[in-house]
Image: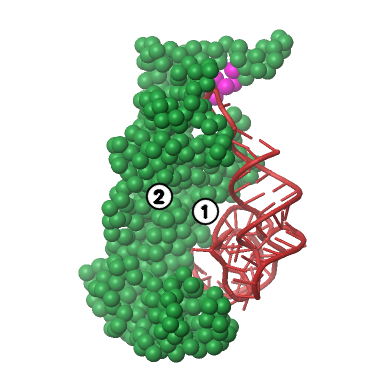
Chain colours: A green, B red
Amino acid sequence: MGWHKCTYYYFCGMYIVQHIQDAVVKALNETFGQSFTAADFQINQIKQEFKGDYSVVLFPLLKRTGLSPQALGDKLIAALQQQGDSLFKSFELIKGFLNIEINDAFWIDFLNRTPAATFGQHPSNGRRAMVEYSSPNTNKPLHLGHLRNNFLGWSIAAILRANGYEVFKSCIINDRGIHICKSMIAWKHFAQGATPHSTQTKGDHFVGMYYVKFNDVYKAQVKELMQAGLTEKEAEQQAPLMKEAQQMLIDWEAGKPEVMELWKRMNGWVYEGFDVTYKKIGSDFDRQYHESETYLLGKEIVQMGLEKGVFYRKEDSSVWIDLTPDGLDEKLVLRKDGTSVYITQDIGLALQKYEQYKVDENIYVIGDEQNYHMKVLKLICEKLDIPNAKHIHHLSYGMVELPTGRMKSREGTVVDADDIIDEMIQTAKMHTESLGKVSDFSADELSTLYETLGLGAMKFYLLRVDPKKKMIFNPQESIDFHGFTGPFIQYSYARIQSILRKASWDEHSKTNVNEQTLFAAEKDILVHAEQFPAVIAQAGKELNPSVIATYAFNLAKLYNTFYTEHSVLQAESEVKKWLRLALSHLSARILATSMELLGIRVPERM
RNA sequence: GGUCCGGUAGCUCAGCUGGAUAGAGCAUCAGCCUUCUAAGCUGAGGGUCAUUGGUUCGAAUCCAAUCCGGAUCACCA
């Protein structure tokens, strides 16, 4: 058993692929007397139609060795055989690919020594990361796009934690500004004292109604003024409602009591509504920042930047930074009246975050419409020598679009978060009832199950695609519960749990399995399972939950194939039964861990 | 116009640090429940990887040009 380099093979970060790399490097160096590295060749998993598990692609080595694929392959095989590694069962050379089959004993050993409950998680790396996500405006309810942001942020935080980071989740609440004043003005004019309570409306939706109302009336006023002969621009500036909103913003900044009171009251309604939604989707934060408290931050930094010569003042006393040497434009950082702009407070907040948390990685989950802004922010922070500015990372995700194009609140084409969640939960209920497998569940158990499944479908749907890419959501074709979906994986998990229950099997039941050989369906699961830690590492490195989603789906598929081909409880021998129970348990744990990293729960029965 | 992102099966998406015959899911069609949960499994059909040229043993993947779609370039946030 020469491959046991340490007791907990996987905690050493030593994967089978690395082991093969090491063996090949050694074989190359011995054969050619040069120093090769793992980067000089490539190892791929072998496709189903060929024999073996992993293959070494020989082409990249031909030039350096001066040999043909056949000759190089022969020499390599000879050298590898010389090493006498009991891990390798067979070598086969096909058209420039050196196919290696791993001994079944290795996979069984892997199963025996892997602690299923914690498998895949990496030990602490002593680094801290902050993930800022969600960042709602307090003038309207959340929509489908916000859900993508929330699910991504939560998942990335979990993935980084599994990669050994200490993670802080933060959220900047955009609770002030002209858009907030708009809904306040509209409420003052048109609500006649109505409240969420008096109208039986969820607070964020209630306030959102007045934001919409503002825009409707404002549009009408602009139209009227234009008919009276003003240009569009003039009309937009002079519309009474807009003037009122602007005045209210000034009053807010001056701290006028009646404005502050209304502001607090209406934001309070929104928070009550958000709380319900956040609780339902499982979003939580270690630290919430409010724009009303941070918007003045950054002014001092501008002063410091001026002294350092990073910024410069124009004649009208506005402050700028010239980013043309970096291929960008000139950017304003302080208005001529001395007030700060969006980016000013972001600079301030970036520094504050660093001072408070000393994070090594500073991740912002923000839509790709702000790519330019984030590029500028990072550049400015670097030029100001804000510590770790180089580790500001914009996790830029694409918009969720409808088949008709972007969602537009003004055109009523927004998919509301609460609505879609309720719809998913209802769909879960419908499926569950028509299958009738949990008729003995209590009402509480049922509603928990519906939420688990409905939200699972929803989250998986939004997380299974590459965050960077925009995605299209078709409300006509509701989100599926079959195939590449959350419920498919939840179902696979529940079926395994059913077996383990019947066998009264738990983690402590695990003993060393003495089996020597594996069926293809058994081995396929183990080969895939062994890659889990590497997959978590990749997801962390790429900040990409879809890697986990795809991985979990493939594992579930492999398990389901195994499930139909072989019986666990009626296995052909007692040893096989134990092997399959351990195999099933490991699969279930990996599926559960994967889903956990996506913020999705798994049911024991469904 | 400048910058950036994208274009892969009817639809939604993988694959993109170059490697074997380009993969899933949905939809369509054909099979599988007296056997551990059929939200499952097996199989079939379906492709000019936007176009053209280049790099090389090899290109969906890298480079260039073109076409199409999107984002962004505010003393808005």
| Farthest-out residue, left | A508
How far from the left and from the top, in percent, is residue A73? 51, 85
Q: Which mark is residue A327?
A: none
Instruction: Please rate how many residues cluster around mark 2, counting C-alpha atoms within 10 Å: few if below 14, some from 14 to 19, many from 20.
Output: many
Q: Amino acid under label 2?
A: Ile
Q: Residue at x 43, y 67 (%)?
A: A555
Label 1 resides on the chain identified as A
Residue at numbered disc 1: A465
The quadrant where residue A227 appears: top right
Q: Is residue A557 above or below residue A487?
A: below
Q: Secondary structure at mark 1?
A: loop
What span is in magenta?
Answer: A210-218
Instruction: Please rate how many residues cluster around mark 1, counting C-alpha atoms within 10 Å: few if below 14, some from 14 to 19, many from 20.
Output: some
How far from the left and from the top, in percent, is residue A321? 50, 30
Residue at numbered disc 2: A156
How far from the left and from the top, in percent, is residue A217? 59, 17
Q: Main secondary structure of the magenta part?
A: helix
Please name whichever residue, A275 or A89, is drawn nearer the observer in this view of the structure: A89
Q: Amino acid under label 1?
A: Val
